[in-house]
Amino acid sequence: MRKARDYDAELKALGDKARALKAKKVQQLGELVAATGADALDIETLAGALLDAVSSKDAGAREAWRAKGSAFFQRRGRKAGKGAAGNGGE
């Protein structure tokens, strides 16, 4: 005979996982704000800049922002990579 599924437990587990993922996303966004130095801006200015970015239809501006963001993460990756390579036995 087949074992009955506990749908309530499965739903609770999925809800817990969704909450954990949302919390992780919020934490990562906060870390991004701090890493870029945007935490020096007052909250209204930061919110306004983000709202403009979200509502922007200018493909050129979005591409410029994407390129700057990509360069930012590549620089950070190299900095982290240098420290990691120094600790490894390569």
Image: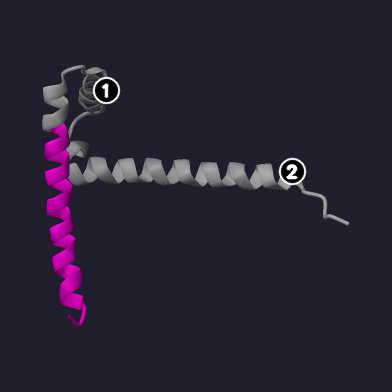
Mark 1 sits on what residue? 54
Q: Among all residues in the image, which is located at the extreme front?
A: 1
Helix, strand or loop at mark 2:
helix
**Mark 1 Cα shell of 10 Å, populated few (<14), some (14-19), many (≥20):** few
Its colouring scheme is one colour
Query: Which stretch is magenta?
Result: 65-90
Asked whether residue 35 is drawn in magenta, I would say: no
Whole-percent x, y for residue 45 in the image: 20, 24
Whole-percent x, y for residue 33 in the image: 24, 40
Whole-percent x, y for residue 69 in the image: 16, 40
Question: In percent of the image, x 42 and y 46: which residue is there?
Answer: 24
Dot in front, 2 or 1: 2
Amino acid at pointer 1: Val
Question: In percent of the image, x 14 and y 32: which residue is there?
Answer: 65
The secondary structure making up most of the magenta span is helix
Q: Earlier in the sequence, mark 2 or mark 1?
A: 2
The C terminus: image quadrant: bottom left
Asked whether residue 66 is drawn in magenta, I would say: yes
Mark 2 sits on what residue? 7
